[in-house]
């Protein structure tokens, strides 16, 4: 499994779509901070608060995840690993870990880029950050992992890169962008489709628990679907 992980992380380091998405996040974040947030008087810390819970661009991590998993079905890489005797659990696990890392990296590239955009005009100061913000970031990371576990499930069901990308991007856009404009109840705001909106423990606790449960359920469902799927 260690050798499999090395291969998958090597693929991630040379994944053109990941670096394209990262460049988009840098450009979107910096311009948002430099142009929009400074015009309304936001500080670097307020920029962090604004973007740490922002789901506007969740379709980009979904795109990367769907391509990363779906491409191995299309290229028959997964078929070859099965014929070589690797367990389906290890085949799935070594792809989920890089996907989670990529999603976390893309989100916080966006957050940091926005802060840099604001700081380049208004100056930098970290005086407002607290320990609660650390727990806030941890909860958001759990929610990102939960969301990507759903994207991996969609990719396994589709089993082809084009279909996985189309299904995952549409799913992320609908749940993280459209639905948040219509639902504001406790259940939706605690889900992985609506990242924790502040660092209050009353917000973080249910969001974190929901994220862990979502991830656990989706990993089991994905493994069950993958075990029963005929890989050609």
Image (spheres, helix red, strand yellow):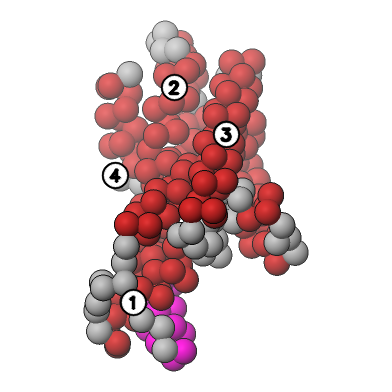
Tag of residue 44: 1
The outermost residue toward the right is 182
| In contact (CB < 8 Å): disc 2 and disc 1 | no
Q: Could you say which is closer to the camera, residue 143 or residue 166?
A: 143
Q: Disc 2 marks which residue?
A: 91
Q: Position of residue 51 (x, y in %)?
A: 45, 67
At x 49%, y 16%, the residue is 88
Query: In which image quadrant can residue 176 be found?
Result: bottom right
Which element carries disc 1, helix, strand or loop? helix
Mark 4 or mark 1, whichever is nearer to me: 1
Q: Position of residue 114 (x, y in %)?
A: 37, 73
Q: Image height check: is 190 above or below 93?
A: below
Label 2 vs 4, first from the N-terminus: 4
| In contact (CB < 8 Å): disc 4 and disc 1 | no
Which element carries disc 2, helix, strand or loop? helix
Give the main secondary structure, helix, strand or loop, of the magenta stretch.
helix
Label 3 vs 1, first from the N-terminus: 1
At x 55%, y 48%, the residue is 207
Q: Disc 3 marks which residue?
A: 213
Mark 4 or mark 3, whichever is nearer to me: 3
Tag of residue 13: 4
Q: Could you say which is closer to the camera, residue 183 or residue 30?
A: 183
Q: Real-space Cα distance between discs 4 and 1?
A: 30 Å
Q: Position of residue 57 (x, y in %)?
A: 52, 62
Label 4 vs 1, first from the N-terminus: 4
């Amino acid at each position: 499994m260690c050798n499999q992980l090395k291969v998958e992380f090597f693929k991630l380091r040379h994944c053109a779509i990941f670096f394209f998405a990262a460049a988009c996040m840098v450009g979107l974040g910096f311009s948002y901070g430099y142009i929009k947030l400074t015009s309304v008087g936001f500080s670097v810390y307020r920029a962090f608060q604004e973007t740490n819970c922002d789901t506007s661009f969740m379709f980009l991590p979904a795109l990367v995840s769907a391509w990363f998993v779906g491409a191995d079905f299309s290229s028959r890489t997964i078929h070859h690993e099965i014929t070589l005797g690797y367990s389906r659990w290890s085949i799935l696990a070594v792809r989920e870990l890089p996907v989670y890392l990529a999603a976390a990296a893309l989100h916080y590239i966006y957050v940091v880029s926005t802060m840099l955009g604001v700081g380049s005009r208004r100056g930098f100061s970290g005086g407002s950050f607290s320990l609660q913000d650390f727990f806030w970031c941890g909860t958001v990371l759990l929610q990102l992992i939960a969301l990507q576990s759903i994207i991996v499930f969609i990719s396994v069901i589709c089993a082809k890169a084009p279909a996985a990308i189309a299904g995952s991007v549409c799913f992320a856009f609908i749940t993280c962008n459209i639905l948040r404009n219509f639902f504001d109840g406790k259940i939706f705001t605690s889900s992985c489709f609506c990242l924790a909106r502040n660092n209050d423990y009353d917000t973080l606790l249910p969001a974190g628990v929901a994220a862990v449960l979502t991830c656990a359920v989706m990993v089991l469902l994905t493994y069950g679907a993958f075990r029963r799927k005929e890989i050609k």
